Image (tube, rainbow, N blue to C red):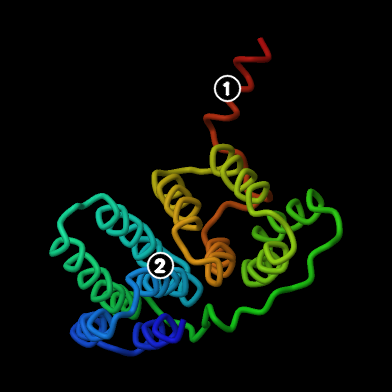
Amino acid sequence: AAATGDMMALFRTGTADEASNAVVELLGRGVAPQSLWDAILCGAGELLMRQPGIVALHAVTTSNALHYAYATSGDDRTRQLLLLQNAAFLTLFREAMRGRGAVGDQRLDQLAPESAGQDAEETIDDIFAEISRNRRTAASKTLGYLQQGAAEPLIDEARRLVFLKGTDSHDYKFSSAVLEDYYHLSRAWRDKYLAAAVFHLRGSGSADNGLVARARAALAK
Protein backbone atom coordinates (compact mmCIF):
# COMPACT_ATOMS: atom_id res chain seq x y z
CA ALA A 1 0.00 0.00 0.00
CA ALA A 2 2.85 2.39 0.82
CA ALA A 3 4.45 1.75 -2.57
CA THR A 4 1.20 2.66 -4.34
CA GLY A 5 1.04 5.98 -2.51
CA ASP A 6 4.72 6.70 -3.17
CA MET A 7 4.32 6.08 -6.91
CA MET A 8 1.26 8.29 -7.12
CA ALA A 9 3.19 11.09 -5.38
CA LEU A 10 6.01 10.68 -7.89
CA PHE A 11 3.58 10.89 -10.82
CA ARG A 12 2.56 14.35 -9.61
CA THR A 13 6.01 15.91 -9.83
CA GLY A 14 8.59 13.39 -11.12
CA THR A 15 10.17 12.89 -14.52
CA ALA A 16 9.77 9.93 -16.87
CA ASP A 17 13.19 8.60 -15.87
CA GLU A 18 12.41 8.94 -12.16
CA ALA A 19 9.12 7.07 -12.60
CA SER A 20 10.79 4.21 -14.49
CA ASN A 21 13.64 4.01 -11.99
CA ALA A 22 11.14 3.85 -9.13
CA VAL A 23 9.41 0.89 -10.78
CA VAL A 24 12.74 -0.94 -11.05
CA GLU A 25 13.59 -0.18 -7.42
CA LEU A 26 10.20 -1.28 -6.08
CA LEU A 27 10.15 -4.50 -8.08
CA GLY A 28 13.69 -5.19 -6.87
CA ARG A 29 12.49 -4.80 -3.27
CA GLY A 30 9.78 -7.40 -3.86
CA VAL A 31 6.80 -5.05 -4.17
CA ALA A 32 3.95 -6.78 -5.99
CA PRO A 33 3.27 -5.59 -9.56
CA GLN A 34 -0.38 -5.18 -8.55
CA SER A 35 0.64 -2.35 -6.20
CA LEU A 36 2.34 -0.61 -9.14
CA TRP A 37 -0.66 -1.08 -11.42
CA ASP A 38 -2.88 0.36 -8.68
CA ALA A 39 -0.67 3.46 -8.74
CA ILE A 40 -0.62 3.69 -12.54
CA LEU A 41 -4.35 3.28 -13.10
CA CYS A 42 -5.23 5.59 -10.21
CA GLY A 43 -2.55 8.06 -11.31
CA ALA A 44 -4.25 8.26 -14.71
CA GLY A 45 -7.61 8.78 -13.03
CA GLU A 46 -6.14 11.55 -10.89
CA LEU A 47 -4.92 13.36 -14.02
CA LEU A 48 -8.52 13.39 -15.20
CA MET A 49 -9.52 15.13 -11.98
CA ARG A 50 -6.71 17.67 -12.33
CA GLN A 51 -7.60 18.66 -15.89
CA PRO A 52 -10.61 16.96 -17.50
CA GLY A 53 -9.96 16.73 -21.22
CA ILE A 54 -8.47 14.83 -24.10
CA VAL A 55 -4.92 14.40 -22.73
CA ALA A 56 -5.99 12.95 -19.37
CA LEU A 57 -8.56 10.81 -21.16
CA HIS A 58 -5.76 9.30 -23.23
CA ALA A 59 -3.71 8.71 -20.08
CA VAL A 60 -6.60 6.52 -18.88
CA THR A 61 -7.14 4.64 -22.14
CA THR A 62 -3.40 4.16 -22.73
CA SER A 63 -2.99 2.69 -19.25
CA ASN A 64 -5.92 0.38 -19.92
CA ALA A 65 -4.29 -0.82 -23.16
CA LEU A 66 -0.87 -1.37 -21.59
CA HIS A 67 -2.41 -3.21 -18.64
CA TYR A 68 -4.22 -5.48 -21.11
CA ALA A 69 -0.94 -6.17 -22.91
CA TYR A 70 0.74 -6.88 -19.56
CA ALA A 71 -1.96 -9.35 -18.54
CA THR A 72 -1.93 -11.03 -21.95
CA SER A 73 1.82 -11.38 -22.47
CA GLY A 74 3.59 -14.53 -21.36
CA ASP A 75 7.05 -12.98 -21.59
CA ASP A 76 8.36 -11.58 -18.31
CA ARG A 77 10.71 -9.07 -19.99
CA THR A 78 7.83 -7.68 -22.06
CA ARG A 79 5.69 -7.35 -18.94
CA GLN A 80 8.45 -5.46 -17.12
CA LEU A 81 8.93 -3.15 -20.09
CA LEU A 82 5.20 -2.37 -20.18
CA LEU A 83 5.29 -1.35 -16.52
CA LEU A 84 8.28 0.92 -17.17
CA GLN A 85 6.64 2.47 -20.23
CA ASN A 86 3.33 3.13 -18.54
CA ALA A 87 4.94 4.74 -15.50
CA ALA A 88 6.98 7.04 -17.75
CA PHE A 89 3.97 7.86 -19.94
CA LEU A 90 1.98 9.25 -17.01
CA THR A 91 4.59 11.92 -16.35
CA LEU A 92 4.65 12.80 -20.06
CA PHE A 93 0.86 13.06 -20.19
CA ARG A 94 1.01 15.35 -17.14
CA GLU A 95 3.47 17.66 -18.88
CA ALA A 96 1.41 17.62 -22.09
CA MET A 97 -1.57 18.80 -20.06
CA ARG A 98 0.35 21.92 -19.03
CA GLY A 99 0.36 23.01 -22.66
CA ARG A 100 -3.44 23.06 -22.62
CA GLY A 101 -4.02 25.18 -19.54
CA ALA A 102 -3.98 25.06 -15.78
CA VAL A 103 -3.44 21.69 -14.11
CA GLY A 104 -5.15 21.46 -10.73
CA ASP A 105 -3.76 19.95 -7.56
CA GLN A 106 -6.60 17.51 -6.87
CA ARG A 107 -5.52 14.23 -5.32
CA LEU A 108 -7.41 10.99 -5.70
CA ASP A 109 -6.31 9.74 -2.29
CA GLN A 110 -7.85 12.85 -0.70
CA LEU A 111 -11.23 12.57 -2.42
CA ALA A 112 -13.83 12.67 0.35
CA PRO A 113 -17.11 10.75 0.08
CA GLU A 114 -20.44 12.50 0.31
CA SER A 115 -23.08 10.54 2.15
CA ALA A 116 -25.35 8.63 -0.22
CA GLY A 117 -29.12 8.30 0.22
CA GLN A 118 -30.79 5.17 1.46
CA ASP A 119 -32.41 4.22 -1.85
CA ALA A 120 -29.76 2.96 -4.29
CA GLU A 121 -31.75 3.69 -7.45
CA GLU A 122 -32.52 7.25 -6.40
CA THR A 123 -28.88 7.79 -5.39
CA ILE A 124 -27.61 6.60 -8.78
CA ASP A 125 -30.10 8.87 -10.56
CA ASP A 126 -28.87 11.78 -8.43
CA ILE A 127 -25.21 11.02 -9.20
CA PHE A 128 -25.72 11.05 -12.97
CA ALA A 129 -27.83 14.20 -12.76
CA GLU A 130 -25.03 15.80 -10.73
CA ILE A 131 -22.45 14.86 -13.40
CA SER A 132 -24.23 17.29 -15.72
CA ARG A 133 -24.10 20.04 -13.06
CA ASN A 134 -20.91 19.65 -11.02
CA ARG A 135 -18.51 16.79 -11.67
CA ARG A 136 -16.51 17.33 -8.49
CA THR A 137 -19.63 16.94 -6.36
CA ALA A 138 -20.66 13.95 -8.45
CA ALA A 139 -17.30 12.30 -7.74
CA SER A 140 -17.80 12.67 -3.99
CA LYS A 141 -21.34 11.32 -4.24
CA THR A 142 -20.11 8.39 -6.33
CA LEU A 143 -17.51 7.51 -3.72
CA GLY A 144 -20.11 7.75 -0.97
CA TYR A 145 -22.44 5.44 -2.87
CA LEU A 146 -19.71 2.88 -3.67
CA GLN A 147 -18.69 2.68 -0.02
CA GLN A 148 -22.24 1.64 0.84
CA GLY A 149 -23.65 -0.15 -2.20
CA ALA A 150 -22.79 -2.45 -5.09
CA ALA A 151 -20.90 -1.04 -8.07
CA GLU A 152 -22.74 -2.98 -10.76
CA PRO A 153 -25.97 -0.90 -10.87
CA LEU A 154 -23.91 2.28 -11.18
CA ILE A 155 -21.72 0.74 -13.88
CA ASP A 156 -24.82 -0.43 -15.77
CA GLU A 157 -26.28 3.08 -15.73
CA ALA A 158 -22.98 4.62 -16.82
CA ARG A 159 -22.86 2.26 -19.79
CA ARG A 160 -26.50 2.92 -20.71
CA LEU A 161 -25.96 6.68 -20.73
CA VAL A 162 -22.88 6.35 -22.92
CA PHE A 163 -24.98 4.59 -25.54
CA LEU A 164 -27.75 7.17 -25.22
CA LYS A 165 -25.66 10.31 -25.04
CA GLY A 166 -22.16 9.49 -26.35
CA THR A 167 -21.19 11.52 -29.39
CA ASP A 168 -17.80 10.19 -30.53
CA SER A 169 -15.32 7.34 -30.19
CA HIS A 170 -13.74 8.85 -27.08
CA ASP A 171 -16.94 8.40 -25.08
CA TYR A 172 -17.02 4.71 -25.95
CA LYS A 173 -13.36 3.88 -25.48
CA PHE A 174 -13.06 5.87 -22.25
CA SER A 175 -16.07 4.24 -20.64
CA SER A 176 -14.91 0.79 -21.79
CA ALA A 177 -11.50 1.40 -20.21
CA VAL A 178 -12.63 2.68 -16.81
CA LEU A 179 -15.50 0.24 -16.36
CA GLU A 180 -13.13 -2.62 -17.17
CA ASP A 181 -10.23 -1.37 -15.05
CA TYR A 182 -12.45 -0.98 -11.97
CA TYR A 183 -12.12 -4.75 -11.59
CA HIS A 184 -8.35 -4.71 -12.22
CA LEU A 185 -7.68 -2.55 -9.16
CA SER A 186 -7.24 -3.63 -5.55
CA ARG A 187 -10.34 -3.17 -3.42
CA ALA A 188 -8.66 -0.34 -1.50
CA TRP A 189 -8.43 1.78 -4.67
CA ARG A 190 -11.17 0.76 -7.08
CA ASP A 191 -13.96 2.90 -5.64
CA LYS A 192 -11.92 6.11 -5.80
CA TYR A 193 -10.83 5.26 -9.34
CA LEU A 194 -14.42 4.86 -10.50
CA ALA A 195 -15.39 8.07 -8.69
CA ALA A 196 -12.71 9.93 -10.67
CA ALA A 197 -14.19 8.58 -13.90
CA VAL A 198 -17.23 10.84 -13.56
CA PHE A 199 -15.02 13.70 -14.73
CA HIS A 200 -15.61 12.35 -18.24
CA LEU A 201 -18.59 9.97 -18.07
CA ARG A 202 -21.86 11.22 -19.54
CA GLY A 203 -24.46 12.73 -17.23
CA SER A 204 -28.21 12.29 -17.55
CA GLY A 205 -28.65 15.99 -18.31
CA SER A 206 -26.84 15.71 -21.67
CA ALA A 207 -28.92 15.55 -24.82
CA ASP A 208 -29.47 12.15 -26.43
CA ASN A 209 -27.35 11.65 -29.52
CA GLY A 210 -28.78 11.83 -33.02
CA LEU A 211 -28.71 8.08 -33.58
CA VAL A 212 -31.01 7.51 -30.61
CA ALA A 213 -33.49 10.05 -31.98
CA ARG A 214 -33.43 8.36 -35.39
CA ALA A 215 -33.91 4.91 -33.87
CA ARG A 216 -36.85 6.07 -31.76
CA ALA A 217 -38.44 7.76 -34.74
CA ALA A 218 -38.08 4.59 -36.81
CA LEU A 219 -39.59 2.42 -34.06
CA ALA A 220 -42.52 4.83 -33.67
CA LYS A 221 -43.62 4.33 -37.28
Residue at x-position 29% and y-position 54% = 71
Residue type at tag 1: Ala
Q: Residue at x 33, y 79 (%)?
A: 31
Residue farthest right in this picture? 118
Q: Residues within 10 Å of mark 2 (few under 14, many from 20)?
A: many
Q: 22 or 176, which is in the foreground?
A: 22
**Badge 1: how crowded within 10 Å, few (<14), some, or many (20+)?**
few
What residue is at 57 percent from the left and 22 percent from the top?
215
Q: Which mark is residue 153?
A: none
Between residues 168 and 44, which one lies in front from this camera angle?
Answer: 44
Q: Which residue is mark 1?
A: 215
- Judged left or right of residue 31, residue 15 is left
Please name the residue that numbered disc 2 is placed on.
Answer: 41
**Where residue 45 sits in the image (x, y, percent)?**
46, 69
Where is the C terminus found, in terms of image quarters?
A: top right
Q: CA distance from mark 2 to mark 1?
A: 36 Å
Image vertical order of residue 10 relative to residue 90, above or below: below
Mark 2: amino acid: Leu
Quadrant of res 86: bottom left
Which secondary structure, mark 1?
helix
